[in-house]
Image: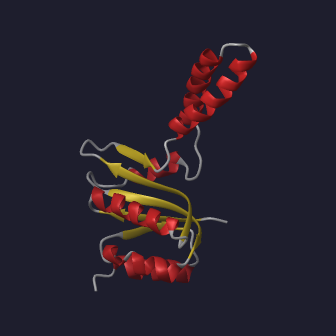
Amino acid sequence: MSDLIVVSFPEEHLAFELRAELAKMQKAYLIDMEDVVVVTKDEKGKAKLHQAVNLSAVGAVGGGFWGMLIGLIFLNPLLGAAVGAGAGAISGRFTDIGINDDFMRGLAENFQPGCSAVFILVRKVTADKVLDGLSAFKGKGKVLQTSLEKDQEESLKAFLESTS
């Protein structure tokens, strides 16, 4: 089962930096994330989701492949690839995997303009090594919500929210 962690920051760039650092740790097998999304709120008060994976592009590639394959059967692979890519892009645009987009937008409604948050869905983590790697963020963020056990949540809050 995955755990959800939501960390907010007073500045947008900090959320993007945290996501980049977590991606490096995932490549080192210190954390296994199912999804990680940065949510920002602009000066006009509009929340924007910055997904780590562009589902429209993934859908277009997959649809293009299957469309070309079907097009080969009907002796028109280019038309099949074009139709398949379009259909795949549309289906990818409306697909929601990982963290629910409506949940993230709803939580972002409470943000001040210019603020950001990172929504992380974690499968597995080597907690001590990940916290060591995130020492640059110590005292800069605030834990908004988690599905962690109480003692794990308190440890995370103490780490991210302490200024010493």
Direction from residue 143 to residue 56 in the image, left or right: right
Where's residue 69, x and y in %?
Answer: 70, 25
- The image shows residue 91, relative to residue 15, as above or below, that is above
Residue at the right extreme, as displayed: 73
**Front residue (pair 154, 72):** 72
Q: Quadrant of the N terminus?
A: bottom right
Residue 25 seen in this snapshot: yes
Front residue of this view, candidates 59 and 156: 59
Q: Position of residue 116 (x, y in %)?
A: 34, 56
Across and down, in percent, residue 80 comes to: 64, 19
Q: Residue furthest top?
A: 75
Q: How many marks?
A: 0
- Residue at 26%, 53% (x, y): give it: 114
Residue 27's place in the image compared with 56, above or below, is below
* Residue under the point 62% across and 24% down: 84
Q: Can you name the residue that lies furthest to the left here?
A: 43
Question: What x and y, as percent, mark residue 160?
Answer: 37, 76
Give the camera-side residue of 81 and 31. Answer: 81
Q: Is residue 94 visible?
A: no
Q: Which residue sits at x=59%, y=39%?
A: 95
Q: How is the image coloured?
A: secondary structure
Q: Quadrant of residue 90?
A: top right
Q: Residue at x 47, y 83 (%)?
A: 155
Q: On the rendered image, what quadrant is the C terminus found in?
A: bottom left
Q: Is residue 126 left or right of residue 105?
A: right
Q: 117 left or right of 30?
A: left
